[in-house]
Image: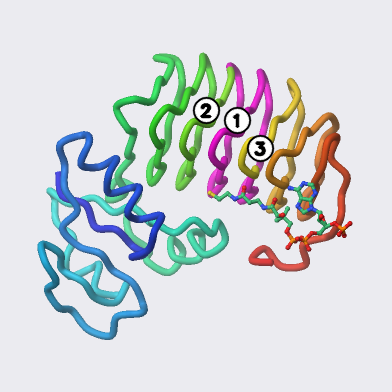
Amino acid sequence: MNYILIGDSGHGKVIEDCIMANGHQVTAKLDDKYEELFKEDAYIKGPISAVHKLLNKETKIIISIGHNAIRQKIVERLQVEEKQYGTVIHPSAIISPSAIIGYGTVIMPNVVVNAYSTVENHVILNTGCIVEHDCLVSNFVHISPGAVLTGGVSVWEGTQIGARASINPTLQVGKWSMVGAGSAVIRNIPDSVTAVGVPTKIIKERRIVND
Ligand SMILES: CC(C)(COP(=O)(O)OP(=O)(O)OC[C@H]1O[C@@H](n2cnc3c(N)ncnc32)[C@H](O)[C@@H]1OP(=O)(O)O)[C@@H](O)C(=O)NCCC(=O)NCCS
């Protein structure tokens, strides 16, 4: 399978490693820092709008941008069919057979997704994070490296859980919020806030989703 990465950045390099570990390759890297299509090394590069020219049956798209709101905006802008997005799972990840994994989602090395969890679309499960049993990870969420969602946790659309943060069982983390690195979440977190610390305290409202 050939992949088109949207976003030519550091995050894309990690995703490319995952794609190659599965025996597939990246053939194009599109980014709006480029004005027109050109060839560099083994890649076609160019603006994001060129994706429609490059797509075919043997090609899948991954949006390789770590910022959740920008990932969402690009999906809205592209208007391509769901089936044209790939799902990339590094071979070292352990995914329960009963887990459901959506499209456009990337699962990095050493991630664990346990029984009956659902990971929706355009999600990033970053290196070594753990999604325990019966969790819900909604669209456009980013679970950062080493973070732990214990059993029955729900993380709603667009939220980022910082590196090595942990969320206690059955808690809900609202939409478009941010949980700081290393934080311990012991109560539900509402929509559109930044929460940090052990245990977490809310330190600010996020006025717009790309704060
Ligand atoms: C939570 C976070 C987004 C806050 O960033 P910010 O909005 O720029 O906030 P500031 O750095 O101005 O910090 C505000 C206050 O929160 C505290 N704080 C920030 N992050 C914290 C954290 N992770 N744990 C505890 N306290 C934290 C700061 O010390 C500061 O406290 P003060 O007002 O008493 O001085 C950021 O610190 C963070 O943890 N990001 C996660 C990074 C990450 O995991 N990335 C993964 C990439 S793959």
Q: How many marks?
A: 3
Cβ atoms at labels 2 and 1 below 8 Å apart: yes
Q: Return the disc, 1 or 3, that comes first in the chain's sequence.
A: 1
Q: Quadrant of residue 162?
A: top right
The earlier-in-sequence mark between 3 and 2 is 2
Mark 1 lies within 8 Å of ligand 1 (Cβ measured): no
Q: Tell me the residue that label 1 is attached to.
A: 136
Image coordinates of residue 76 in percent, x first then y, are 46, 64
Q: Magenta: predominant secondary structure element?
A: loop
Tag 1: amino acid: Leu
Question: Does residue 142 belong to the magenta stretch?
Answer: yes
Give the residue type that dot 3 points to: Val
Asked whether mark 2 and ligand 1 are closer than 8 Å, the reply comes as: no
Q: Does dot 2 land on a helix, a strand or a loop?
A: strand
Q: Position of residue 106 (x, y in %)?
A: 40, 41
Above or below — where is 1 with respect to 206?
above
Residue appearing at x 71%, y 68% in the figure: 208
- Residue range of the region highlighted in magenta in the rendering: 133-160
Q: Residues within 10 Å of mark 1 (few under 14, many from 20)?
A: many
| Residue placed most toward the observer, 99 or 17 | 17
- Up the image or down, 88 lies above or below 60; here it is above
152 drawn magenta: yes
Q: Which residue is mark 3?
A: 155
| Residues at circles 1 and 3 in contact by the CB criterion of under 8 Å | yes
Say which residue appears at 38% left-offset and 42% top-offset: 103
Left or right, residue 71 beside residue 138: left
Ligand 1 in which quarter: bottom right
Name, please, the residue furthest toward the bottom.
Answer: 35
Tell me if residue 116 comes above or below residue 83 in the rendering: above
Whole-angstrom CA distance, mark 2 to mark 1, is 5 Å
